[in-house]
Image (cartoon, grey):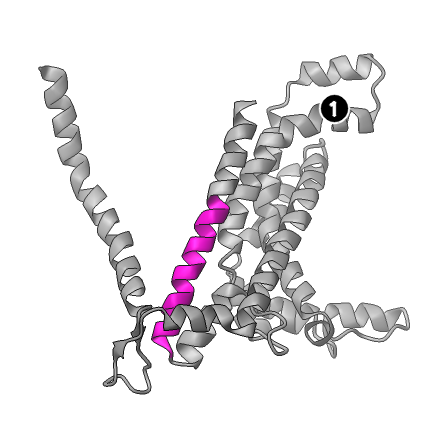
Amino acid sequence: MATRQTRTLARLMMAPSVILLFIWMIVPLAMTLWFSFLNYNLLNPANVNFAGLFNYKFFLTDPAFIKSIWNTLVIVGGVLLITVVGGVLLALLIDQPIFGQGIVRILVISPFFVMPPVAALVWKNMIMHPGYGVLADINKFFGLRPVDWFAQYPLLSIVIIVAWQWLPFATLILLTALQSLDEEQKEAAEMDGANFLNRFWYLTLPHLARAITVVILIQTIFLLGVYAEILVTTNGGPGYATTNLAFLIYRTALLGYDIGGASAGGVIAVILANIVAVFLMRAVGKNLDK
């Protein structure tokens, strides 16, 4: 009897936060879903009528939609490749006993705390600028022609900027996992004659498998919504060269004033994100069960 009363009391205490969270999530989603079936343009707010599936058909048949999906996949895949590989290498490096190890770790992690618009502006105006950027000065020093990164390699530039921001996160997670590796296993492998590459491939990498999976899962969820870096640097261009799904929805809503079309795009983005999340969660579950 006491146990039942305790459970009832616990549920009552949790109820306000659960209800608040439910309202916080469901109300905006329900409004977005409702607007997606309306012909609703901010330039003519008085003329709002039911459009059925027209907004979904319009959004899905827009040539920019396929391009935005491809760009989203390239950004996510490119950033994951750089951050996972770079995170493993940096974790191995700063795990070594070096002078000023604490300061080095702080410096490596610090880019993660820079706001995305600020980081994008720094890369655009101080590093990648073809006239007075750091990379341009390096090219001039070696007698090479400066590269206009955002005109010649716009999508690669976005990938580099976003990867620079997320590399510290991957490094921190992988470093934590690396430090949990049993020293006795390392010593046993060294006594058996295993060189560094063998120890890394057969001992360290399998130990980091779970941490790598977690990094991929968390980063993918956030990378699907990359927006600020694109807005500040390329504004989705040239053309649609750097327009991902999140930026396409922004462009439809705030530049085209098409609330109905943007809402349809938001619903499509939520569905695609949940599909990706389900596959990733299954992959994580299989990895953690091993």
Q: Which residue is mark 1?
A: 202
Report whether 171 appears left or right of 255: right
Percent position (x, y) of residue 289?
Answer: 52, 24
The residue shown at (38%, 80%) is: 257
**Quadrant in which the N terminus appears:** top left
Provide the secondary structure element on which disc 1 rests: helix
Percent position (x, y) of residue 13?
Answer: 15, 35
Of 177 and 28, the residue lying toward us = 28
Report whether 30 appears left or right of 126: left
Report whether 229 appears left or right of 89: left
Report whether 195 appears left or right of 13: right
The residue shown at (70%, 76%) is: 151
- In this picture, which residue range is highlighted in magenta? 258-277
Of 67 and 91, the residue lying toward us = 67
The residue shown at (64%, 60%) is: 159
Q: Is residue 181 above or below residue 93?
A: above
- Residue 53 seen in the current view: yes
Percent position (x, y) of residue 242?
Answer: 61, 69
The residue shown at (22%, 42%) is: 18
